[in-house]
Amino acid sequence: MREDTQAAALASLGGATPLRLHNLLEQRSVGEAFEAVESGSLGSAVAPVEVLAAWQRELKGIDLNALSEGLDAAGARVTTLGDPTHPVQLVNDIDPAPVIFGCGTLPDPSLAHVAVIGTRRASSIGREVAREIGMGLAEAGVVVVSGLALGVDGEAHRGALLAGGAPPLAVVGSGVDVVYPKRHRDLWEGVVAAGAVLSEAPLGGRPEPWRFPARNRLIAALSDLVVVIESRASGGSLLTVEQAIRRDVEVMSVPGSVRNKAAEGTNQLLVDGCAPARDVVDVLVALGLSQTALATRRGSADAGVADLAVADLAVADLAVADSAVVDRSGSSVRSGAVDAKGAAVLDAIDDGPTSMDEVVDRSGLGVLEVYAHVEELVAAGLVVHDGSRIRRQY
């Protein structure tokens, strides 16, 4: 029988906590551990005797052939502490993670890994900042680690995917074959295609509440630095912060308005001494990637100069009436400058600063499509970035 199937079977047993699985596998191969459970030859050093007896009964009822087929159908792999492909950051972690399920390809562990986390009920600005930091980190070759949850986590990974740079890494609180939340299916599939999704939960594992604190420790363990973007005073993100502190992993916090309830936790982190993360450059400097940060700063400045030059050309183009069309505000745009979807994005942008979330809602397009078309409009000199928002260029 395949070793990965045996490991998956052991991880699916009732009461098979990470600590008990660690006790089981620390001095045994997966095959030896499987046989020991099956034969009932284990002692109480692994788990209470009543738990071991229940494991023996459960193991007899598992269809190993069906489990193997399920792993293959999900494109999932299973690694253990003795496996050279087990995430290296988890091998000697202070809290054992002896069995990991994964889909996709693990990012190179030599790359810097940064967790970008925050509340599920993020503000529009919080979501925008998460996308921007996720995008900037990936462009700089940094692996973005997050939990694929609603709000900040998911937006950070959207930004990382849009950048097309370093592969993203997600740690989830359900089985790797159970997409949660369901509305993130496209994001989940995108992360698997570009990077990897990991979980301790067995195949079919439901997103039960107790799994998420356990997941948070893995996010901290896999990361060289943690960035928190909006967290309520008692938000779940603070559990990840606690786990990071236990591991001497640096924590940075994005400042928020004192009137924003979603920023109470992050602002308190600043009061407690965490370094502020105003933008991706602050994070890169904290990682010691100062040359990359300097290039990012210079790139932003050069882009601003280029935008002004392109805008001058666009003004001249707008004077060519025989090739122009008129949008809802009466401004003229060369018909060849944008396609129909680009025009829909432009039409969704107000005269004043407009958030990306507002553009997404008004245009009816997906987040990644909107970002791509906004960059085309910027290159055409039709819109400009205004902080974390965008506005028309006249």
Image (tube, rainbow, N blue to C red):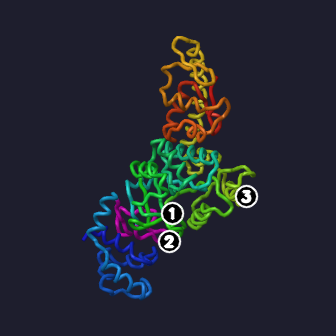
Q: Is residue 52 left or right of residue 154?
A: left
User: The residue tagged with tag 1: helix, strand or loop?
Assistant: helix
Question: Residue 273, can we see it?
Answer: no
Expressed as whole percent of the image width and height from the top left, the position of residue 167 reads: 44, 49
- Marker count (numbered): 3
Q: State how far apart marks 1 and 2 are (Cα).
A: 9 Å
Q: Residue at x 57, y 18 (%)?
A: 313
Give how far across and how far down residue 368 sits, in percent: 49, 40
Q: Position of residue 232 (x, y in %)?
A: 67, 59
Residue beneath label 3, please?
Answer: 271
Residue that badge 1 annotates: 221
The quadrant the N terminus occupies is bottom left
Question: Which amino acid, mark 1?
Answer: Ala
**Residue 198 inside the magenta-drawn segment:** no
> Sequence order check: which comes first, mark 3 or mark 1?
1
Q: Which residues are magenta?
A: 76-99
The quarter holding residue 299 reads top right
Gap in angstroms between the C-alphas marked 3 and 1: 24 Å
Three-letter code, disc 2: Asp
Q: Nearer the viewer, residue 94 or 196?
A: 196
Q: Quadrant of the C terminus?
A: top right
Residue drawn at (64%, 45%), measured in percent from left and top? 125
Q: Dot 2 surroundings within 10 Å: few (below 14), some, or many (20 or more)?
A: some
Residue beneath the point at 36% across and 65% down = 79
What's the distance in space between the residues labelled 2 and 3, CA to CA? 29 Å
Of the pair 356 and 143, the residue shown nearer to us: 356
Q: Which residue is mark 2?
A: 95
Is residue 104 or residue 337 the one in the foreground? 337
- The residue lying at 53 percent from left, 62 percent from top is 220
Q: On the image, which quarter does residue 48 sit in? A: bottom left
